[in-house]
């Protein structure tokens, strides 16, 4: 590897390295390999784009700062993400100095496109080191790149890496210590974009010719698969089947572990009743913690199964294909297929979905995507759906092995999607959304999902869920227990003590508002803490019904309790409410950060609450009429 001698003047805060690359070049995997757990995430000053910084520990014990910049194809930004990358490299970013060294990640399977970004960075006068990533995949495709020859052609050090397996990481870290031997390559400046593009393209062609890579690669296996996956008829049919099977598995696969968790929670409650005296502490433990937060744990299997399928589809490279397939449908409502990824992320949680809209270049498309993202059914809604479907929809197998419960769940998710598309279509009528915007996105090669990555993703999701159960859900459950237990019932009272508590008064007051849509005072009360997190509604119902029941039934599962006390129209009405109601206060806070004010989150909350009430009213009245 050729070295290029010069001196870099290091700032007092230490050497700042910037990691730059095209989307899908493996940059994030390389960042994780270099920094490990030594990472912190924040936002850039004055903007909402995520800022990821890590620390590299070298073999000699030195610590280097590494900034992971958003992926970009060029230094001519088209989205907020790309604009931040360009501003940081040019030294224009507020609160962030110009990097001392750029680690440019190149996809070894597509040098023709990746090299142009490197040349733009060199034109800025920044010293560079190249991480030639995905070298193993390139070799399997018959692409053999001489790193020494490429280094001589580019005038910068080139290290072959395979970030997913850690190959080349030690060598790259060693090179990063040799900062006194690098200098920026001097390229004659060309200010006009068109002239620069022509110069870069000529240089790229020359380098590829020197490396023997000028000829176009033959058809790849992914191209042959895409003939079917992206077919105008078979492609959408395959996508529909995959989504349908996903929701079937959420119920059919989750039943055994769910039953096991419910049995454990019930046993724990009975043990507490048996071993503890009848006092406020036992009521707190049994009626508050176990009946409330403990009941939410039963829905962890459904959430993990949902995320398992999403992670597999993401790891395999299928998700960008799904965006391509849905581009025409989304174009009919004034959006592009690029909105698909943020909307799909919202099925996990609306907050990362809202943040993912930063990759959408068009401001109008980005705002509309933000406004409809909360209508995608997030994982926090899944426990509510699972509870109501399990209590009121029989576990019955239809034709072809289709589970009725899974079919109902699919219908609920589909209702949220249809509602979001309807809102986008209405916004198209009242904004300049009639313009057709072609979808341009990269389709990565198919590959088998890495079990390690799937396991890490599932563990992170389980950890997030358990932290919520042990954090905000537990706190709100205990607070609701306190409101439901004090003041106590007066002498001679015939009803359950909760009816005379602060929570009972609040619930009866809210019931006046929600009675037209079939909600009783227990449901009305549970909606209030449910604003903080959707799962809290389950724990709130568990606490309220445990305190309303006889002491011997306090640890009974929530499903049978509501099945006995609610009508079927009430259950349908609550399902309709959760399809449209705002997800949580944290989502509204994220929208406020992304849009830079309170106007959009207030509009979002108003229209979603209005839609939820209207949908519940129609559902309750129609189902009551049909059922007599």
Image (tube, helix red, strand yellow):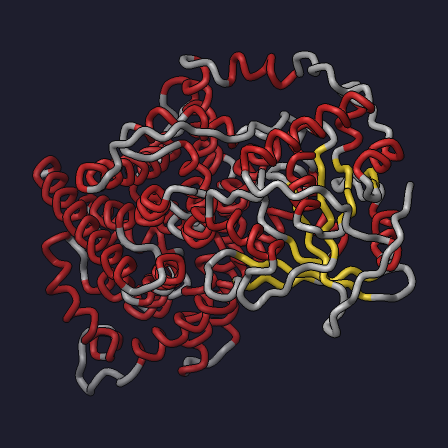
Name the residue furthest bottom: 491
Q: Position of residue 452 (x, y in %)?
A: 71, 42
Front-most of 564 and 294? Answer: 294
In this image, 414 relative to 502: left or right?
right
Tell me if residue 571 comes above or below residue 337 in the rendering. below
In this image, 324 relative to 571: left or right?
right
Residue at image point 39% right, 33% down? 406
Front-most of 412 and 354? Answer: 354
Tell me if residue 309 comes above or below residue 555 in the rendering. above
Residue at image point 55% right, 17% down? 226
Q: Is residue 385 visible?
A: no
Front-most of 449 and 125? Answer: 125
Front-most of 343 and 243? Answer: 343
Tell me if residue 298 comes above or below residue 106 in the rendering. below
Q: Position of residue 514 (x, y in %)?
A: 15, 59
In this image, 217 relative to 156: left or right?
left
Residue at image point 36% right, 46% down? 363
Q: Quadrant of residue 572?
A: top left
Q: Is residue 356 visible?
A: yes
State the quadrant of the C terminus.
top left
Residue at image point 23% right, 57% down? 603
In this image, 187 relative to 465: left or right?
right
| Tally of numbered tags | 0
Q: Position of residue 338 (x, y in %)?
A: 43, 35
State the quadrant of the N terminus.
top right
Q: Quadrant of residue 336?
A: top left
Q: Position of residue 468 (x, y in %)?
A: 49, 63
């Amino acid at each position: 590897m050729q070295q290029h001698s010069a001196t870099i003047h290091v700032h007092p805060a230490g050497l700042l390295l910037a990691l730059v690359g095209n989307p899908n070049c493996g940059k994030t995997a390389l960042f994780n390999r270099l920094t490990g757990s030594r990472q912190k995430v924040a936002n850039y000053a004055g903007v909402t784009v995520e800022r990821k910084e890590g620390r590299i520990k070298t073999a000699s014990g030195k610590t280097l700062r590494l900034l992971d910049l958003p992926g970009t194809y060029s230094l001519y930004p088209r989205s907020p993400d790309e604009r931040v990358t360009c501003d940081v490299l040019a030294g224009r970013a507020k609160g962030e100095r110009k990097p001392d060294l750029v680690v440019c990640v190149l996809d070894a399977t597509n040098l023709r496109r990746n090299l142009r970004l490197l040349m733009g960075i060199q034109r800025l006068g920044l010293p560079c080191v190249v991480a030639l990533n995905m070298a193993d995949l390139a070799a399997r495709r018959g692409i053999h790149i001489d790193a020494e020859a490429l280094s001589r052609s580019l005038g910068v050090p080139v290290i072959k890496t395979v970030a997913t397996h850690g190959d080349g990481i030690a060598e790259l870290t060693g090179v990063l210590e040799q900062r006194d031997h690098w200098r920026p390559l001097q390229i004659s400046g060309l200010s006009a974009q068109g002239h620069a593009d022509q110069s870069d393209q000529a240089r790229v062609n020359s380098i590829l010719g020197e490396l023997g890579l000028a000829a176009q690669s033959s058809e790849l296996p992914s191209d042959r698969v895409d003939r079917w996956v992206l077919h105008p008829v078979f492609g959408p049919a395959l996508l529909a089947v995959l989504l349908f099977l996903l929701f079937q598995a959420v119920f059919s696969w989750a039943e055994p572990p769910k039953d096991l968790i419910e049995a454990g929670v019930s046993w724990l409650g009975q043990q507490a009743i048996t071993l503890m005296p009848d006092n406020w502490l036992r009521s707190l433990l049994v009626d508050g913690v176990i009946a409330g937060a403990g009941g939410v744990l039963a829905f962890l299997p459904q959430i993990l199964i949902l995320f398992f399928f999403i992670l597999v589809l993401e790891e395999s490279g299928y998700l960008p294909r799904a965006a391509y397939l849905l581009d025409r449908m989304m174009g009919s409502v004034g959006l592009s297929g690029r909105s698909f990824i943020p909307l799909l992320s919202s099925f996990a949680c609306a907050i990362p979905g809202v943040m993912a809209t930063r990759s959408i270049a068009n401001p109008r498309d980005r705002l509309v995507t933000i406004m409809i993202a909360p209508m995608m059914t997030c994982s926090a809604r899944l426990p509510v759906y699972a509870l109501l479907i399990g209590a009121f929809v029989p576990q019955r197998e239809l034709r072809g092995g289709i589970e009725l419960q899974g079919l109902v769940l699919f219908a609920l998710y589909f209702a949220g999607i249809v509602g979001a598309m309807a809102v986008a279509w209405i916004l198209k009528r009242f904004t300049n959304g009639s313009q057709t915007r072609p979808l341009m996105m990269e389709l990565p090669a198919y590959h088998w999902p890495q079990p390690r990555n799937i396991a890490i993703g599932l563990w992170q999701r389980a950890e997030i869920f358990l932290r919520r159960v042990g954090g905000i859900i537990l706190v709100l459950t205990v607070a609701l227990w306190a409101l439901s237990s004090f003041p106590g019932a007066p002498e001679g009272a015939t009803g359950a003590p909760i009816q005379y508590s602060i929570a009972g008064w609040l619930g009866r007051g809210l019931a006046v508002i929600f009675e037209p849509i079939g909600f009783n005072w227990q449901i009305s009360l549970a909606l209030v803490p449910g604003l903080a997190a959707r799962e809290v509604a389950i724990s709130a119902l568990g606490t309220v019904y445990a305190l309303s029941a006889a002491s011997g039934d306090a640890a009974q599962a929530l499903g049978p309790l509501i099945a006995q006390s609610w009508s079927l129209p009430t259950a349908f009405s609550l399902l309709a409410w959760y399809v449209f109601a705002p997800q949580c206060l944290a989502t509204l806070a994220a929208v406020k950060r992304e849009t830079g004010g309170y106007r959009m989150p207030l509009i979002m909350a108003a229209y979603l609450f209005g839609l939820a009430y209207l949908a519940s009213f129609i559902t309750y009245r129609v189902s009551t009429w049909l059922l007599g």
